[in-house]
Image: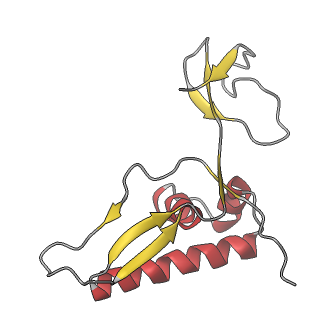
Amino acid sequence: MARTKKLRQIQMAPQFCGFSPDGLLKNKGKEVSITFAEYEALNLCDYELMTQAEAAVVMNVSRPTFTRIYESVRRKIAKAFIEGCTITFETGNADIAEWYKCNSCRISFTIPQGKAHECPFCKNTDINHAQ
């Protein structure tokens, strides 16, 4: 029996629903589906420029698991680019982080599991869930 997958911690879901190639007749049925965890892995390594070890900590997974997620999304994007496929997103096995706002310095932030509920910058404990 396979182990149940641990929830992958993501900071924010994509703010769009996908991509489609421009300039081609639409390939019917040709679609690549990327999970929120794969999107987060790509964001952390290629956009935020984190190492895989740092990104694994953020996503609450082991480094080898992070590497598998990261390699999967890179292969999917390469396929979509080369074959002209539409890219869509699916939730997958993801847990979206809760965002907070500091009432003192007004920044938005997440709180890693097990950490104190205080602003990471000014250490104020007067915080609210961000809307």
User: Which image quadrant is residue 23 in?
Assistant: bottom left
Is residue 12 placed above or below 108 in the rendered structure?
A: below
Residue at coordinates 58% horizontally, 15% vertically from top-left? 105
Whole-percent x, y for residue 57 in the image: 73, 57
Point 46% across, 73% down: residue: 33
- Near-viewer residue (67 or 28): 28
Quadrant containing the N terminus is: bottom right
**Residue 6 x %, y %:** 78, 64
Q: Quadrant of residue 92?
A: bottom right
Expressed as whole percent of the image width and height from the top left, the position of residue 54 reads: 68, 59
User: Which quadrant of the structure image shows residue 27?
Assistant: bottom left
Identify which residue is drawn at 31% across, 66% down.
19
User: Farthest residue toward the front?
Assistant: 28
72 with respect to 22 (left or right): right
The number of numbered discs placed on residues in the rendered structure image is 0
Residue 131 x, y percent position in the rendering = 53, 26
Residue at 45%, 64% in the rendered image? 89
